[in-house]
Structures are given as structure tokens and as C-alpha cells.
Amino acid sequence: MPEIFAQVILPLPLHDAFTYRVPEKWQLQIKPGQRVVVQFGAKKFYAALVLSLSEDAPANIDLKEIVQLLDEEPVILPQNLELWKWMAGYYCCTLGDVFRAALPTGLKLESKSKISLTGNDDEQEIGEKEFRILELIKQDVSTPDSLQKKLGLDFSYAALKSLLDKHIIQVEEKIDAKYKAKSETWVRLHPDIKSEKDLLEKEESLQRAKKQQELLVHFVEKTGAFQAAEQPVVSKKELLKGTNFSSAILEGLVQKKILKSFQQQVSRIETNTSKQADLNLLNKYQQQALAEVKTCFDNNLVTLIHGITASGKTEIYIHLIDETLKQGKQALYLLPEIALTTQIVERLKNVFGSKVGIYHSRLNSQERVEIWKKVLLFQSDPGEGYQVVLGARSSVFLPFSNLGLVIVDEEHENSFKQFDPAPRYHARDMAIVLGKQNNANVLLGSATPSYESFYNALMGKYGLVSLTKRHSNVELPEIIVADLTRAWKRKQMHSVLTPELFGLMEDALNNREQVILFQNRRGYSPFIQCFTCGWIPKCENCDVSLTYHKFKKRLSCHYCGFSIAMPPECPECGSPEIKTRGFGTEKIEDELKPLFPGKRIDRMDLDTTRSKNAFGRIIHNLESRKTDILIGTQMVTKGLDFEHVSVVGILNADNLINFPDFRAHERAYQLISQVSGRAGRKYNRGKVVVQTSHPEHPLIELIRQQDYRAAFNTQMTERRLFKYPPYFRLIKLVVKHKKPETVDRAAGQLANLLKRSRDLTVLGPEFPLVSRIQLWYHKEIWVKIHPGLPLADVKRFILENISWVRSQPENSSCMVNVDVDPA
Ligand code: ADP
Ligand code: ZN
Ligand code: ZN
């Protein structure tokens, strides 16, 4: 047989695939898409992915052999790898970066140092500390870290080293499979018992073992042995539940060959028996929109559905998914992470039952592997595999075999973009590529489309479909602009509430209606300050002030997690008068309690939703009207659908509008419309109060009129003038180093090199708003690229210059992140 070589991708930031020899025993089995263990570097082992196989070896290189073949079948299909390649090229990152982002953690492995005995400890003298280490190693404590943990101060590196030197122990690199199928113990009658008569005999034989006899009787009663043709089985857990029988008693029966126990794999994913509901009938506007979408699909167009909040976009998606499934194809429904609530999950599960898989980061890594495998299973067993996936960003990587439809809901959401680490990809744009590669239809949906998508639609690049009526026929909410400055001056504020908002809240609450308040900051106050000397506590690692969290009595950094206890007095001047500044959601909750006595106030932000079920509980309480007022950050703006919310308050629109970013106005408009959309969805027209110190700001007026098109047009004029997307492409380069002078120099060099190209517009370098994060200084360079330029050439030019700058000895260990289409 000719020799075979495998080109593999390693989970490391390396550009190339690496070639390994395939041992003869695996030559017939190995396929692209399988994982293999290979050695890379002196000691480390990795699970790598086979990209391709060939019969030609690269010349004159000494090739290593593959150590192990991990999968019987590929975990990913060749067509899925096309997206990886595209992504690496477009986002200027390595295939290894994509590999790390794509596979769920449970399918990635890395070797760890493991200590084991060599077996020649016989005739050697060892000391007390060495002896204790040896004892632990014999009990399978096998890494230096865990030894240190167990021994605490008694641990000695010298002792460990001496054991190594004496060849009593050795260090090996071992690779652990992270994903293990979960199994449970099940119990049945032993196959030797063939009739009721046998069973009776056995039972009598247990006269001296009363407990065992009782358990056998319990087993027979519980399972009804010999009542059906097939012998019944029951899980051990189920059998012993609510009884006093111990595992030892069961074990006794197993040893006497009366019962038999065996292991059976179980799924970690909840499969609550699904209520299958019929599809809702579409109203006439929705029918019209659906027909238009299909016409666009027939013309092979990516299609944007611009439908106001509560117009029933989700219903249209469900109809399209249904048709896709009927054609035997798979559908992917992408949503931003935080919009993946039980509300939407249940709507889909009601209609599509067990065909739906859910994929997001709140699942643990084992659960993610199971979803991954069930998507893959669809290819060989369409009845058992997942045909629909409702998922967040990373579901674009799932191993679809026959994709027919990709939906990106809330397509304007910038959380579809991965900021860090590489690949810095945008899931909406990847969904479009995925659709093209698989010949699948792509539908984008939003009440406030991103300006890029809307522009593409106006230019005819995308199909455009509009929905302008709410399903319930209720009008969009009325928007009331409330002047913060005026209310402050006239001393009319009720804590953070203008008289307008306060009055509407009182009315709503008196009518048993609910209120949602939006504030863009979590914690108690964004910073604190000494009243006497003006001291403001800052993060040790980042260039930001620390946020005060009252409940935890701590000050913490929202960039790196650094935190300290709230000081009782100013560390600079000793004054006990430390003031909180600004309002976070926690403080608002505190201040509202006395204003609305007896009303139930809840809060939804990162701090209150850390536990797995907290999110669902908050939503459930609002749904069942246990909550009267919900205060929250961005989280409350996403896709939630409640019937009885009639008032929404935006506590401070100014910090949205004045954010220093070319997308600030686009974002502010989107956010305010989205959160407004939570009001008055079903019964009466809702009311939204936008509090601002600049009621005369043109954007505020556009928000009040809810004129998406006018806001879009205003921005387009500026974007064109200042060379921003959609007219120009952007690449953001972030130069990072621990020393500010190195960042300065390297960023300066890079910018100068890039500015030599007359085709590019290069801005910077400049320190961003937060110039130091986790001890690293940052400086940004923005490159604006005319759409007529060949993008691949521009990227190559940029990357070459980055390499040059990084290779200068004075810039050593300088990092440069490349962010294509920064969000
Ligand atoms: P959107 O996604 O556009 O915000 P939804 O699909 O969430 O809107 O619809 C808003 C509400 O109206 C939901 O409660 C939904 O169940 C209901 N609804 C929309 N269209 C229909 C329909 N055709 N039949 C029944 N209920 C509908
Ligand atoms: Zn002070
Ligand atoms: Zn920090």
C-alpha cells in the first residue's frame, strides 16, 4: 500500500496545515474531518483536525506519525470546512484560530503533564517530603498543581525534582478526552430466570436475606416482570427512588445472578415530551410579506425583512422553517445570545418538537457536544438528528449537511460580532457566506436594520420586504420626550424619574399594568468619589474607574474583573465622606422602592443573571405579573414579548447619543426603538418616556417621530462625507504592549508605513477611550478602504507591514490585532 499523509489543523494560531504520516493500521479508516492526536513541539500533544489526505510527502522533512485516531467518523463535514477557510482569509486570522472558535470545548483536547511511577523505587533512600509526594502519586494525584494543592505548605519542588532525578517518577504528556458520554446503571432480571416459576424459586431462596427478598418483590411490582413478552428494564435510580434499599442490597441480588445490571448511555439534553402545536395562520400583511420573501428567494437574493416590533416576524420565520423541513432540509435560526430566552425556545419547540436543537454559551461543554453530534447525525439518520437549530453566534459552525435556510433575527445586533479573540467574525455576515456555500436561502430580520444591510437592500443587493402593522393592530407606542435639565432645575425629579415618567408609571401601576425601565449601566454607581479631596478609585490593571456594587460592598472593574472591598474612608485624605456618582441599575432599584411602596421591583442585568436559571425566572415573573417594574440593561431590549407592559422609560438617552463612535446614532436609535417595542404589544397603545438633557437634539426628534428612514438618511450623508461604512470598508488595528512607549513607537511606525499607500485613508494611531486593559496599553489605527480597491491586496499590504513592525527587535512581544469590519 502506498504511504498516506494527513494535512492537519492544530488548535494554535498557526497559518499552515501540518503534515503527518498516517500509520498503516489507520490508512483505510482515516477521513478528512476526523480528529487525530499529534505531537507538536517537543512535548505537547494536541487533538488536530484532518483537513486533507495525500499520497505525496513534502520533500526532505522528517515527518512525525499520527499518534492516535480519535473519531470513527468525521466530526465535521468537508463542506463545513469551506466556511473555516473563508473566515480565516476574510478576517485575517489563522485556521487554528477558527478551529478553536468552531469546535465545542468538549471536542478540543490538549495534553497535560502527568506524573507517574517508573517502578524502580525499591532500593532508594527517600526523605519525608519525597515519601508524601510518592504516596499521593500512588493515589493517582498526578499533576504538579494538584500535588501542590493537596500538600499545601508541605509541598516541595526540590523533593519532586529529587524523585525525578532518582528516576522513581517520570513526567509524561497525556491527553484526556474531555467529552464522555453520560451513562446510567439499569437493572433487569438475570437472563437465567426464564419463567415465573424460576422467579418464585429464587425468591424463596432468599428467606435468609429479607432485605434482598423485599427488593426483589419491589422490582417485580415496579416493572411487572413476565407480564409482557419482553423483559422489563428499569434504571437503578428509578428502582431505588423513595425506598430504603441501598445499592449494596441491589448488588447482592446481582451477585446471586437474580438481577442483572448494565450501563446505558443517556442524553444530557432535556427532551421534555413536546407538545406539537399547529402553525398560526398568518394575517394578510404577513401572508403578503411571506410571498414577497419567497419571490426574493426565487431570485437568489439574500433578503431583509424590515418589520416593526410585534409585527409577527417570528411567525413568518416559523412558516419558512416549516417549508424548509418539508423539503427535507435543515434550518438555522440565529439570535443574539441574550435574546435566546425560554419564550422563543418554547415557541419553536411547540411547533417543531424534538427536531429543534438549541445552541448557546449557557450550555455546558458536554451538552454542546451532544447538540453538535445530533446536528451531524441528521445526515445519516434524519429522524433522530436535529433539523432546526436555534442558536447564538457560534452556531454558524455546526456541522450541517443539508442546509436549506438561514435566518438572522435582530440582524442589527452588534453582539453578533466576536470582539476577542480572533476570529473577529460577524455571525450575520458569516450566515450569508454559509448560505451561499450551501445554496441555502438567507433571511435577515429586524425592526431597525443595520445601516449596512438597509443600504445593501436599497442598492438592490438584497431583497427588501416590509411589515408595517403590528399583528394585534395596536399602534406603535407614543414617544414622550422628557427634559431632564428642566426637571432638575425646577426640583421636580422623583429620584431619577422626571415628572412625566413618574406620573405615567403611577397610572400604569394603578391599572395593574407593568413598567420596564432601561439604564445602560449595571452596578450601584459607575464610580465613587471622595467629597473632600476628589479621589476616585481606579482599576489597578485598566484605565477605568471602579464601579461600586452595594450589595457585595465591593468596587469592581467591568473590564478585567479586578475588585476590592469598599473602603470605609478615603485612603488619600482619611475623610469618611465618600459619595456615589451616577446611577447604575442597582441604585435605581434601591431608589425606586420607597417611591412605589408595595410594588414588586425586579432587575435584569449581568449581575442578577449569572446563575443558570435566573434569566428564566425573571422573565417568568414578569410574564405571570409577579413583577410590576423591571429595571434592566440592554438585556431588556431584546425580543421579549409581554402582554401587559404599557410604559417603558429610557432613563438617560444622552449617554447613548454622545458615545464616541461613528455608529452611536445608529445604535441609540436602534436601542430606543427596540426597548420601546416592549410596550403595548397586545392591548392598548403603549407609552415610552425618553429622558434627556438635550430634547432639541435632532436625533431625539427622529426617535420621537419613529422615522427610521429619516434617521438612516441623515446618517448616510455623514457616513459618505467622513468615509465610513457602508461607503467605505474599515479595518481596525489595535497595537498592544505592556509598555506605553513601545505601543507608541510601534503604532507610529505601523501608521507611517500604511500612510505611504496613497489609496488608503489611515487614521491614528490614537489611544482609545480605555487605553489600558489588563496591564496592556492599546493604540488604534483605523484604515478606511474605498470599495473599488481589491480588498485581498489591501489586507496583504496591511499584514506585511504588521509583520515588519513586529519583527523589529525594539518592538519585541508587541501584539497587533486585526479587526475587519469592526462593530
Ligand atoms: P416580532 O418578531 O415582529 O417582534 P412576534 O412574532 O413576536 O413579532 O409577534 C408578536 C406577538 O403577536 C406574539 O405574541 C405572536 O405570538 C403574536 N402573533 C403575531 N402574528 C400572529 C399570528 N399570525 N397569529 C397569532 N399570533 C400572532
Ligand atoms: Zn479624600
Ligand atoms: Zn480592570
Image: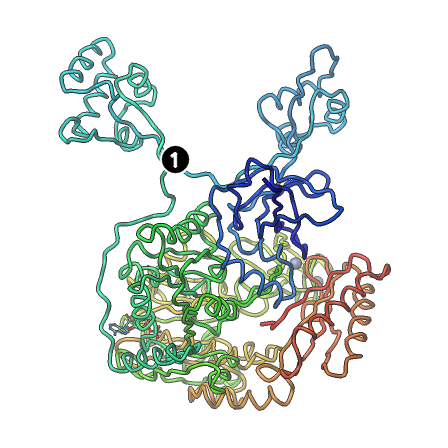
Asked if the residue at label 1 sits under 8 Å from ligand 1, the reply is no
- Picture residue at 53% right of the left edge, 40% below the top: 70
Q: Secondary structure at mark 1?
A: strand
Q: Quadrant of residue 468?
A: bottom left
4 relative position to 231: left or right: right
- Picture residue at 28% right of the left edge, 56% below the top: 353
Q: Position of residue 158 (x, y in %)?
A: 77, 27
599 relative position to 364: left or right: left
Task: Classify the position of the C terminus by image quarter.
Answer: bottom right
671 relative position to 3: left or right: left
Q: Which residue is mark 1?
A: 183
- Picture residue at 71% right of the left edge, 17% below the top: 128
Task: Classify the position of the N terminus by image quarter.
Answer: top right
Query: Which is more toward the observer, 157 or 121?
Result: 121
Q: Position of residue 246 (x, y in %)?
A: 32, 22
Q: Quadrant of residue 763?
A: bottom right
Q: Position of residue 613 (x, y in %)?
A: 40, 52
- The kind of residue on which mark 1 rests is Ser
Query: Which is more toward the observer, 724 or 529?
Result: 724
Q: Does any portion of residue 246 appear in the rendered image?
A: yes
Query: Which is more toward the observer, 593 or 520?
Result: 520
Q: Position of residue 203 (x, y in %)?
A: 19, 15
Q: Residue furthest right?
A: 810
